[in-house]
Image (tube, helix red, strand yellow):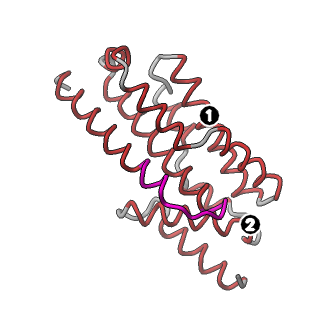
């Protein structure tokens, strides 16, 4: 890839991440970012700033559903994987890419998505969601959204560009959204 091709790709990605209404275009942009990050000249901190700020969101929302298992099994792994992704983008070092690869294998976004679904299937979760429902629903939806971003980036970076897991996570997002909407109606929120 020539320097001009890389510059064009970066401009395309910058224009698409977080600025398009077409969700698939956003994920394609993140996937492309993962695919060219090794070849990007200089700092890509402007790109990193446009990616969702998962830790900032959690801090703003007082970050949890109030369940230590949720934090341990989902929030902490997603935060670690997100920070590893940011390191790849900002440092652009082979070590950062290797760290991301190891982290991605340990905390696979698809498996974390299944963990989230299992968590939401428990009656204790439904009961816990009643108090401060909208805040907790926002956390759940942010978790699945972050998993989709991480999967898109990982698919591009690890050179498989396989959309299978990305599409599965998108399907899980719809299931989770339906569950949240059902609870919203049931709770009268």
Q: Where does residue 86 sit, x and y in percent of width and height?
A: 67, 51
In x, y percent, where is residue 33? Answer: 60, 65
Image quadrant holding the N terminus, namely bottom right
Residue 117 percent location from the top left of the image: 41, 32
The residue under the point 59% across, 23% down is: 72
The residue labelled by disc 1 is 77
Query: Considering only vertical position in the picture, is 185 above or below 53?
Result: above
Quadrant containing the C terminus is: top left
Residue 31's image quarter?
Answer: bottom right
Whole-angstrom CA distance, mark 1 to mark 2, is 24 Å
Q: Residue at x 77, y 68 (%)?
A: 42
The segment highlighted magenta reads 156-169
Q: What residue did someone put label 2 on? A: 38
Circle 2 sits in a helix, a strand or a loop, which is it? helix
Upstream in the sequence, badge 1 or badge 2? 2
Q: Position of residue 178 (x, y in %)?
A: 26, 38
Q: Is residue 166 magenta?
A: yes
Image marks 1 and 2: residues in contact by CB distance under 8 Å: no
Q: Residue at x 61, y 63 (%)?
A: 160
Identify which residue is drawn at 36% across, 25% down: 121
């Amino acid at each position: 890839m020539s320097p001009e091709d890389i510059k064009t790709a970066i401009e395309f990605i910058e224009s698409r991440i977080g600025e398009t209404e077409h969700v698939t275009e956003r994920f394609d942009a993140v996937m492309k970012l993962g695919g060219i990050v090794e070849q990007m000249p200089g700092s890509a901190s402007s790109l990193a700033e446009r990616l969702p700020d998962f830790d900032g969101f959690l801090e703003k929302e007082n970050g949890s559903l109030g369940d230590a298992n949720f934090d341990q099994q989902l929030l902490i792994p997603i935060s670690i994987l997100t920070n590893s992704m940011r390191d790849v983008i900002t440092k652009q070092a082979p070590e950062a890419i290797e760290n991301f690869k190891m982290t991605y294998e340990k905390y696979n976004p698809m498996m974390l998505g299944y963990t989230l679904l299992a968590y939401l299937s428990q009656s204790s979760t439904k009961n816990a969601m009643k108090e401060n429902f909208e805040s907790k629903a926002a956390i759940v939806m942010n978790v699945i959204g972050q998993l989709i971003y991480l999967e898109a980036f990982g698919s591009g970076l690890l050179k498989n560009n396989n959309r299978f897991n990305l599409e599965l996570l998108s399907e899980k997002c719809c299931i989770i959204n339906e569950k949240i909407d059902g609870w919203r109606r049931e709770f009268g929120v």
